[in-house]
Amino acid sequence: MSIDGRRVVVTGMGLLSCCGKTVEENWKNISEGIPGYDSITAFDVSEYSSQVGGEVKDFDPLEYIDRKESKRMDRSAQLAMAASVEVMKSLEGFDYDGNDIGTVIASGIGGIWTFETQHSNLINKGPSKISPFFIPMMIADMPAGLVSIKYGLKGPNFATVSACASAGHGIATSYMMIKQGYTKAVLTGGTEATISPMALGGFCSMKALSTRNDDPGKASRPFDVDRDGFVMAEGSGLVLLEDLEYARARGAEIYAELVGVGLTGDAHHITSPAPGGAGAVAAMRMALRDAAIEP
């Protein structure tokens, strides 16, 4: 186990995805087999080979943040701010010390919508038309920064960026920080809003996406023999991790315990896993050792 054996528990959850805008709504729709994927509506996709996506439907950032703030945030940050509202309900009525809580919110690419919009301004109107908020809206760690400011969370604050593993690494890193005593709690998870013309076009060029455009609700089928690619989606999923004793002291509702993590690299290929799943096996062994379970 880690150097001091602290136990880490989950005490708060927040989720916006193509299946719903709360944890409860997501669970209900997933349990009932209601698909969240549909034809993309954010822009014209008629010339794209893949036209299917998982958009957060009817998302209005003004339900969570004021108009002035929302205009200075990329959609990825808006989604994270919305998810944080549900997570932080678990701290309602508790006079927490912001120095005890960190914020680690992952994003594989950050504000790509902002980048595309401002690049268009540069090409069509010149550099003077680039927004002064371009950089802070685009960088990947801005969701973590904005959420920490909103709630006064002054502990460790950053983003993890590792493509599809970004949020997993964020949660694992937060777990390790709590286990090792760097902080008592961390609001962590991930956020992404990459259904944009360039991102969709890039994945289409890679031939990585499903082209089941005539049946979008069944396009995502990762373990099916007829799988023809993945489906792009957007959303934000956050959890509050806490030191068990800290959670108990404040009478928090505990949903789960995180007992071990494993992080490895295949050193094999930029997208394909190593033959035989060697990296996954090594990560599992590491997690089991962390949990003091004999592999």
Image (cartoon, rainbow, N blue to C red):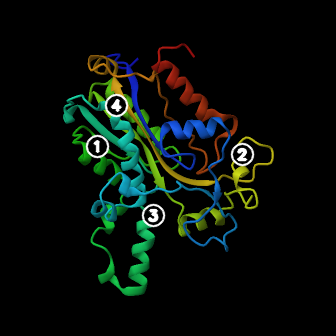
Task: Give the image location of residue 211, x and y in percent.
Answer: 73, 60
Circles 3, 1 touching at the beta carbon (< 8 Å):
no
Residue bearing mark 1: 157
Tag 1's secondary structure?
strand
Circles 4, 1 touching at the beta carbon (< 8 Å):
no
Tag 3's secondary structure?
helix
**Residue drawn at 53 percent across, 40 percent down:** 25
Residue bearing mark 2: 221
Is residue 236 positioned above or below 62 on the image? above
Circles 3, 2 touching at the beta carbon (< 8 Å):
no
- The numbered mark at residue 112 is 3
Tag 4's secondary structure?
helix
Q: Nearer the viewer, residue 202 or 231?
A: 231
Is residue 223 positioned above or below 74 on the image? above
**Residue drawn at 26 percent across, 29 percent down:** 182
Mark 3 or 2, nearer chain start: 3
Q: Nearer the viewer, residue 54 or 285?
A: 54
Q: The N terminus lies in which quarter of the figure? A: top left
- Disc number lying in front (1 or 2): 2
Residue bearing mark 4: 90
Q: Amino acid at mark 3?
A: Ile
Is residue 77 positioned above or below 183 on the image? below
Q: Amino acid at mark 1?
A: Asn
Structural distance between the alpha carbons of marks 4 and 3: 31 Å
Structural distance between the alpha carbons of marks 3 and 1: 21 Å
